[in-house]
Image (tube, grey):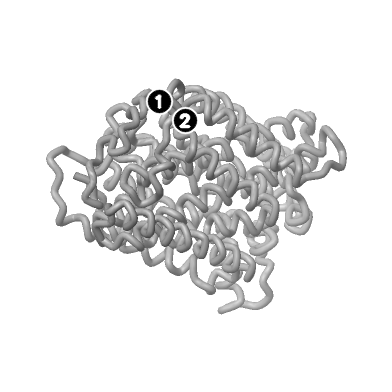
Amino acid sequence: MSTTGTPEATPLNEPPLKRVISSKLMILFVIGDILGTGIYATTGKVAGKVGGALWLPFAIGFIVALLTAASYVELVGKYPKAAGAALYTQKAFKVPFLTFIVAFMVMCSGLSSASAAARAFSGDYLEEFTGAIPSTLIAILFILALASLALRGVSESVKTNVVLTLVELSGLLVILAIGLWAVLTGGGEPSRLGDFEAEGTGFALLTSVLGATALAFFAFVGFEDSVNMAEETKAPARTFRKAIFIGVAVTGTIYVLVALVSSLLVEYTVLEKSSGPLLEVVKAGGVVFPPKLFAGIALFAVTNSALINIMMASRLCYGLANERVLPRAMGKVLPNRRTPVNGIIFVTLLAIGLVSTGEIEGLGDTTAFLLLCVFAVVNIAVLVLRKDRVDHPHFRTWTPLPVLGAITAIILASPLADRAADVYIRAGVLLALGVVLWAINKVALKVRGEDRT
């Protein structure tokens, strides 16, 4: 039985999702989701907050991501269902309203991430080919194109993800090769690696580093998207353990190295002003590499991030509709393609709204803030659910890790992280929309006599 008292299988009499994702595909899915917009587009904004010590926020973010990743691995092994964090929240706390808010925050984080990717797509990287363009229109068309691909099917989308992941990984390897060449030839300015933008020490320095870390954490989000693909994955308990840990370890190492190279070769003030900061690194590297080719790689990278986030958000809608947390219509599956058609349409409309009202830094920071709040709940949930036994083997994380994960997530989500007020306003508006949807769904359930809370 489900956590809300309805059958978990297919309560809407819709066909089940296909289990087509193998272990190798899931590893590439996780790496591809973590890599992308964060490192390609927001590196400069992180540098603007912290200065030349750009590598430090990424190193701290790496540790925080590993703490929460361990909690997700335990929970997805116990409960391999599509609803992810919302399912864990409901099982742990049994408060439907909290469950809905967590679910809605996860969905909105994916959409704000996809919107940041759309903004990055229409920025400096695309302008390498086109010159000045109407960026908002391009970003909206970009979202619509990805929604069309998501409608075709999970197999097509995940295979596209594999190709795009290999492309975006090649771009970061180019950056690392440029950095290695600079070190071997005596290029770059190593002294910048220890410079902090904040004046003085103490509290100002702390808030500067925390603010930069909170934004850098946007580059690590993605592994949590994968748990919403659990019902389409073969042997999910074993597959997710390998995929999440490998994905976070590979991307974290690459991020720290890319941040070191970026600060070594380019002044943080130059990085800060660019929506394509890694393109500045290529141009300053002293190695002949066509800027247009790198810009093309970067466009593939942000495309990958947006595609996966739209897939995640639509699957979350599907899972929550099956749990009757969202209206039944969200669980509608396209008969031939067996993709959650209404979920995809709904999240696409929300993404268009976000991309029309925000820029890269604000959307990225909104994503990080929402997910940090969710991660705090998930880390607490894994401890609460230790009393819930399941009849199959699964991974169990070391208890101090979720405790540290919850504490660090709360700190990075707090005002100590020195984020702009518009981030809190945007998140508040999204949550208000969530409350309205919750109320509408409650009324609909009461009218049909199905409200069991």
Classify 315 as above or below 164.
below
Classify 203 as above or below 122.
below
Classify 59 as above or below 403.
above
Q: Position of residue 91 (x, y in %)?
A: 24, 54
Say which mark, if any, is on residue 24: 1
Residue 230 can be seen, yes or no? yes
| Along the line of sight, the residue nearer the viewer: 387 or 183 | 387
Q: Amino acid at mark 1?
A: Lys
Q: Position of residue 26 (x, y in %)?
A: 41, 31
Left/right of residue 396 with respect to residue 272 in the rendered view: left
Q: Position of residue 107 (x, y in %)?
A: 48, 50
- Dividing the image into 4 quarters, which one contains the N terminus? top left
Q: Position of residue 135 (x, y in %)?
A: 78, 45
| Along the line of sight, the residue nearer the viewer: 166 or 224 | 224
Residue density around tag 2, few if under 14, some if 14–19, many if 20 or more, within 10 Å: many
Is the Cβ of the residue at disc 2 closer than 8 Å to that at disc 1? yes
Q: Amino acid at mark 2?
A: Leu
At 35% from the left and 62% from the top, the residue drawn is 97
Would you identify the image quadrant in which residue 318 lies? top left
Reading the image, the residue beneath label 2 is 28
At 77% from the left and 33% from the top, the residue drawn is 287
